[in-house]
């Protein structure tokens, strides 16, 4: 290092440290004074700050004299360090301190019980786990359109990709060994991977059902966070995955233990029920979608309201406000299983959210990078399909139940097209016909069809098209 490089590096270090806990950011002069670098010329300070921006450690907000500088990836805590052993997930100094505590031998970690006060102390829109700078950063990344649209519009636009990515990543974080390609073949072509356990197949198919339900609900009514919504989400995720079918969507009635942790969850059923209701009501009152998402990711696993599947329920529940507000989804792309487990242990045993916040922020950045490219490749959604989506779904489902194929719908579609202005009927007919041609075993669920209904229709269509002389 040359003599000229050393002072510049020292200045960068001091400036970055000065931004620690400056949640609203600092101007160039403020950060320079706080760093004790008043003797530094403004041009030198700006050059050092720009180098920090280029390295991804700092980002700028605003223009010219109003510009403020904010440390990134620290959630307002401290300069980032790469605490993941594989170097994949940078975390803050606070996050690293948590990680060091929860990775000590379990015999060196004191027992920790559920503390109701952790939930009681959170006041919606007054308490924040995500600093303002982080919330603004995530909102900037997550925006998909400058104009408001009905809830779930964006999720339907990228539905197939969302279905595969979120199902695979959430299942992977549970130890599922299906590959991304295996997952795609299962969800799209109904082709199970050879040599894999049936439990793994069921887990992925359950994710599919739960994601379909979330997207569908968001499209037909304002999506509110209620304990009933969380229980239904759990029931979909855990179908045929728990010993007692009554436990699917039911608040647990017996104690559970957390493997590899000193945490002892709440054991009294009535209190668990009360806390789940409180978690839902508090979450629903939060106005910022990312704070709402992260709150659910913190408190659902911490409460352990269900006999099993609490973390996967939390991962999907964290997407409820994101889907509702047409933001890019949180798919937990590339998050190492160990990093997620350690972050949740920090909540369980220490009631500290900083490490999970690091994982959440980094994961959302990764997800947004992916879905920015996906959105660019898809273009804008079809306004006609968007305007008539409910009638399209109703019509196609009715035609399927009546056994019609794309080639014989002229008369059967008439009662449905009669609801539309004459100018829209030809386009509507063409859309319904295309939907019938594209219907397969991997997408009938979005029409609300039962497997038996689809199978009956498919067999009928196969028989009809196999007749001699069929064109």
Image (tube, helix red, strand yellow):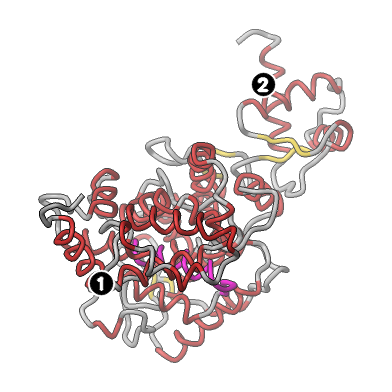
Which residue occupies the extreme right position in the image?
65
Which residue occupies the extreme top position in the image?
2
Q: Residue at x 35, y 83 (%)?
A: 252
Residue marked by disc 1: 453
Q: How many marks?
A: 2
Q: Position of residue 37 (x, y in %)?
A: 81, 28
Label 2 CA crowd tier, 10 Å (few <14, some 14–19, many 20+): some
SS type, badge 1: helix
Question: Does residue 296 sit above or below 373 in this rendering?
Answer: below
Q: Where does the magenta region start and end?
A: 208-224
Q: Position of residue 203 (x, y in %)?
A: 27, 63
Q: Residue at x 30, y 73 (%)?
A: 401
Label 1 CA crowd tier, 10 Å (few <14, some 14–19, many 20+): some
Does residue 105 appear in this view? Answer: no
Q: Nearer the viewer, residue 139 or 294?
A: 139
Residue marked by disc 2: 9
Tell me which label, 1 or 2, sits earlier in the chain.
Answer: 2
Dot label at residue 205: none
Q: Quadrant of residue 58?
A: top right
Q: Nearer the viewer, residue 293 or 25?
A: 293
Q: Residue at x 45, y 55 (%)?
A: 431
* Distance between mark 1 and mark 2 Cα atoms: 67 Å
Q: Main secondary structure of the magenta part?
A: helix
């Amino acid at each position: 290092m040359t003599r000229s490089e050393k002072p510049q590096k020292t200045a960068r270090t001091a400036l970055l440290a000065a931004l620690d806990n400056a949640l609203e950011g600092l101007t160039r002069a403020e950060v320079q004074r706080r760093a004790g670098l008043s003797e530094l010329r403004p041009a030198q300070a700006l050059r050092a700050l720009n180098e920090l921006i280029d390295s991804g450690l700092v980002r700028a907000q605003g223009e010219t004299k109003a510009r403020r500088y904010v440390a990134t990836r620290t959630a307002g805590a401290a300069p980032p360090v790469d605490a993941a052993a594989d170097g994949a997930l940078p975390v803050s100094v606070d996050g690293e301190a948590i990680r060091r505590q929860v990775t000590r031998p379990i015999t060196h970690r004191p027992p920790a019980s559920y503390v109701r006060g952790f939930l009681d102390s959170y006041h919606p829109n007054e308490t924040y786990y995500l600093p303002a700078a982080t919330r603004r950063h995530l909102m900037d990344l997550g925006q998909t359109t400058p104009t408001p649209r009905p809830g779930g519009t964006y999720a339907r636009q990228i539905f197939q990709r969302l279905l595969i990515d979120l199902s695979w990543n959430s299942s992977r974080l549970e130890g599922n060994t299906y590959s991304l390609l295996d997952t795609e073949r299962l969800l799209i072509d109904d082709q199970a991977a050879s040599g894999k356990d049936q439990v793994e197949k069921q887990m992925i198919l359950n994710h599919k059902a739960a994601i379909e339900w979330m997207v569908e609900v968001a499209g037909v009514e304002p999506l509110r966070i209620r304990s009933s919504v969380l229980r239904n989400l759990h029931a979909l995720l855990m179908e045929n995955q728990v010993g007692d079918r009554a436990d699917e969507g039911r608040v647990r009635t017996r104690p559970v233990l957390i493997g590899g942790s000193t945490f002892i969850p709440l054991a009294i059923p009535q209190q668990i029920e009360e806390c789940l209701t409180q978690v839902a009501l508090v979450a629903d009152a939060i106005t910022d979608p990312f704070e709402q998402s992260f709150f659910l990711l913190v408190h659902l696993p911490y409460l352990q309201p269900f006999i099993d599947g609490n973390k996967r329920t939390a991962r999907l529940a964290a997407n409820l406000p994101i889907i509702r507000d047409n933001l890019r989804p949180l798919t937990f792309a590339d998050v190492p299983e160990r990093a997620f487990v350690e972050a949740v242990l920090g909540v369980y045993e220490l009631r500290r959210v900083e490490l999970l916040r690091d994982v959440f922020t980094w994961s959302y950045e990764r997800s947004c990078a992916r879905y920015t490219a996906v959105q660019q490749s898809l273009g804008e959604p079809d306004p006609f399909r968007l305007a008539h989506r409910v009638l399209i779904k109703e019509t196609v489902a009715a035609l399927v139940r009546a056994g019609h194929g794309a080639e014989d719908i002229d008369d059967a579609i008439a009662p449905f097209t009669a609801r539309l202005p004459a100018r829209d009927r030809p386009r509507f007919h063409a859309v319904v016909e295309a939907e019938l041609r594209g219907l397969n075993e991997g997408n009938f669920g979005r029409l609300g069809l039962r497997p038996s209904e689809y199978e009956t229709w498919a067999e009928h269509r196969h028989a009809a098209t196999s007749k001699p002389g069929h064109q």
